[in-house]
Each structure stands twice: as structure tokens, then as C-alpha cells.
Amino acid sequence: MRDALGGVQSVLVLGGGSEIARATVRKLVADRCRTVILAGRRPAALEPVAAELRDAGATTVEVVAFDAQDTTSHATVLGDVFDRHPDLDVVLLAFGVLGSQPEFEADPSAAAAAVQANYVGAVSSGLVVADRLRRQGHGQLVVLSSVAGERARRDNFVYGSSKAGLDAFAQGLADSLTGSGVSVVIVRPGFVRTQMTEGMTDAPFATTADAVADDIVAGIRRDAPVVWSPAKLRWVFVVLRHLPRPIWRKVANR
């Protein structure tokens, strides 16, 4: 349960290896969050992050094995977390695969695996989390989407389509939770400079993991339905979303 000042006391991160997720949790811990559960495919890789959070003031930090693509395990793995921590304030769904469009076109099985992680895994785990939050009667599910899902580009349409599906799912899930005490915060970052995008040319309005984390924490505080990061992208995509397709192709594929 949140503290008397509305501060987040506990957070579960699905995709604890995400740089944006790690930056967000560091800021939550600095703002009095004391219980952190980091869930990821490689738990050993998350131990240094857990140690850092303990040093920063978190009193309970757990690392849990979680595979977004293993949907048959989600109910059990996440159910166990909620059984141990039956009063979670925030769940941050932050896992995802960027991949390479040329690789996906050359190997459709790689494309399918990325979509399995980005969309199918999110649907499976998101529904489990929503059910448990609904049962406890409060909480926020923060879903890391992307502006890539607003309109697919030629150079990343597999990734963009998976994020479009995730974004639509999160919007519908938010509507289904109305009146339950549970809300969904959809985060739409633009190009973020991280290890995942290292070597790529910056897109316009490129940002950093720390800046996105600031926007996420602010969105959590005000229970925003949608967080754009940076905020100006909201207005950029009001225009881009409605460009005629021939113009969009020229603009998006420069």
C-alpha cells in the first residue's frame, strides 16, 4: 500500500534487465520505495542491480526467474510473487525485443519469437497481473510501449506491429479495469539511447533511459493513462498518424 504521501512502497518489474526499468526503479527507491522484485530471464545478471538497490535504501529486494516467452509459466511464477507480496503498488512491464528488420525478413522464425516476447508474453503476463491487482483492490500496471507502434515504418515494422498490438491490448485492459481500483499507465517513449540501440543513428527527439524514467515516475504519481517521452512526441504523432501514406513513406524512411 502506498505511504501517507502517496509514495510507491513496492514494485514488481517484469524485465528487470531493461535499462529504462532499472532507471525507473532507482528513482522510486530514492522516493521511499522499499520493496522491489526484479523478474527476468537471467536472474544472475540481475543480482548486481539488486545489490545497488539495497545500497540505495530498498529493504526487500528479490530476484525471480521469469521468461516472457514461456507463457505457460506466467500464472505460477507471478502468482507466487503475489502470494509472497500480496499488496503490490506498481507492476512495471518492461521486457521486449528490438531485433533487426533485415534479420526478421531473412528469418521469419526470429520475427515470430520477437512478437512472442513483445506481444504474446505481455498479454499473458499482463492478464495474470491485472487479475491479481484486481483481487487486492488497488495498484498500477505500467506498460512500456513505444511510439513505433503508432505507425509502422519500413525499417522496423515487425517490432512496430508488436508494439501496436501491445498498446491496443493495454488500452483495452485499462478499460476493463475501470472501477476496480486498478489502473494502467501506457508509456510511449521515442528513440532511447540504450545498449539495445547502440550503433543506431539517433531519431529526432532521441532521449535517455533516465529521462524516460523521470517521465514514468511523474506519470505514476498523477496516474496518467498515457505517458509520452519526451512529451512533445504526442503532438508530433498527431500529425504523423494522419499523413497520407505516400508522404509517410518519404518522411519515415529517410
Image (cartoon, rainbow, N blue to C red):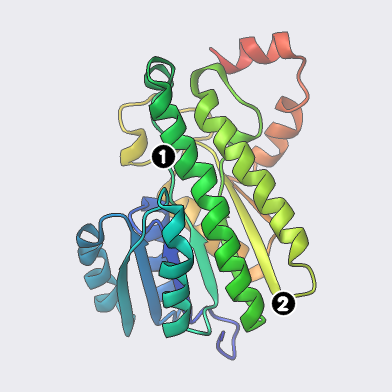
Q: Which residue is mark 2?
A: 181
Q: Amino acid at mark 2?
A: Gly
Residue drawn where x is 61% and y is 69% of the image:
140
Q: Percent from the top left, x then y, of residue 118?
A: 49, 43
Q: Nearer the viewer, residue 238 or 181?
A: 181
75 and 85: which one is in front? 75
Give the side of residue 181 with respect to residue 124, left or right: right
The structure residue drawn at horizontal position 76% and vertical position 62%, both measured from the top left corner, is: 176
The front one of 190 and 113 is 113
Side of 60 relative to 246 (left or right): left
**Above or below: residue 33 compared with residue 222:** below
Rendered image quadrant of residue 5: bottom right
Q: Position of residue 204 (x, y in %)?
A: 53, 28
| Residue 32 to residue 219: above or below | below
Q: Upstream in the sequence, badge 2 or badge 1?
A: 1
**Depicted 35 relative to depicted 242: above or below:** below
Residue 218 in sight in this render? no
Residue type indicated by callout 1: Val
- The numbered mark at residue 97 is 1
How many neighbours does mark 2 have within 10 angstroms: few (below 14), some (14-19), or many (20 or more)? some
Q: Are marks 2 and 1 in contact (CB under 8 Å)?
A: no
Q: Residue at x 50, y 31 (%)?
A: 159
In percent of width and height, residue 132 lies at 58, 74
Q: Most extreme residue toward the bottom, as rendered?
A: 4
Residue 105 percent across, percent down from the top left: 44, 16
* Residue beneath the point at 56% across and 67% down: 129
SS at circle 1: loop
- In the rendered image of this protein, does residue 59 appear above or below residue 199? below
